[in-house]
Image: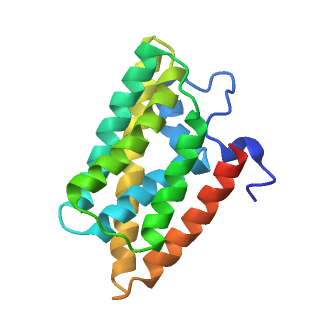
Amino acid sequence: MLACTPLSVMAHPALPGHTHGFVNGFLHPLSGWDHLLAMVAVGIWGVQCGGRARWMLPLAFLATMAAGGILGMTWRVQVPMLDQGIAATVLVLGLMLAGSVRVSVLTGCWMVAFFALFHGYAHGVEMPATAAGWAYGLGFVVATAGLNYAGILAGQAMQRFETRIPIRIAGALIAIAGAFILARA
């Protein structure tokens, strides 16, 4: 499916009118597999790590992504391999899930924050420096929070099986998608 729709593989198609208003910002994370999978994976990984990580990892991703968006709006410098960094997010998070890797809350927060900078910066650069740009940013943050929460719910549902296999399978599928996206970036 992804091979047949190359523009939908990346969430940065540069379509006219793509970066205006709350609704476009809200829909943006849902329009590209790289964002959709990464943001859901953060929530699932938080559940897999357990304890406070369940909320701290998504919050760290969300806050750093917002900061990266502001940085992208104001700094506007070319960051090398930006799309590859975004694609690597999907691959790495998928591998963490597939490998059932648990880390400390602090380590997990630093990891997701690193990747969130790529996501936020890319969209900050795309945002216009107008009120519509801020509305777009707010929409993007709200949608990201929703996707993180969807990942938390999915992770909790998969944990009910009393085995790590469902989360590991989901992680493997996310990692495969990440490898595909990275190869096309």
Q: Is residue 40 left or right of residue 103?
A: right
Residue at x 48%, y 52% (from the top left corner): 38
- In this rendering, the answer to whether 130 lies above or below 115 is above
Q: Is residue 147 left or right of residue 125?
A: left
- In this rendering, the answer to whether 33 lies above or below 119 is below
Location of residue 8 by image quarter:
top right
Residue at x 61%, y 27% (from the top left corner): 18
Residue 29 screen position, x and y as percent: 52, 43
Q: Nearer the viewer, residue 93 or 33?
A: 93
Residue 39 screen position, x and y as percent: 44, 51
- In this rendering, the answer to whether 147 lies above or below 133 is below
Residue 62 screen position, x and y as percent: 33, 42
Q: Is residue 95 left or right of residue 105?
A: right
Give the farthest residue toward the left: 52
Q: Nearer the viewer, residue 166 or 78?
A: 78
Residue 158 screen position, x and y as percent: 40, 78
Residue at x 35%, y 56% (from the top left corner): 149
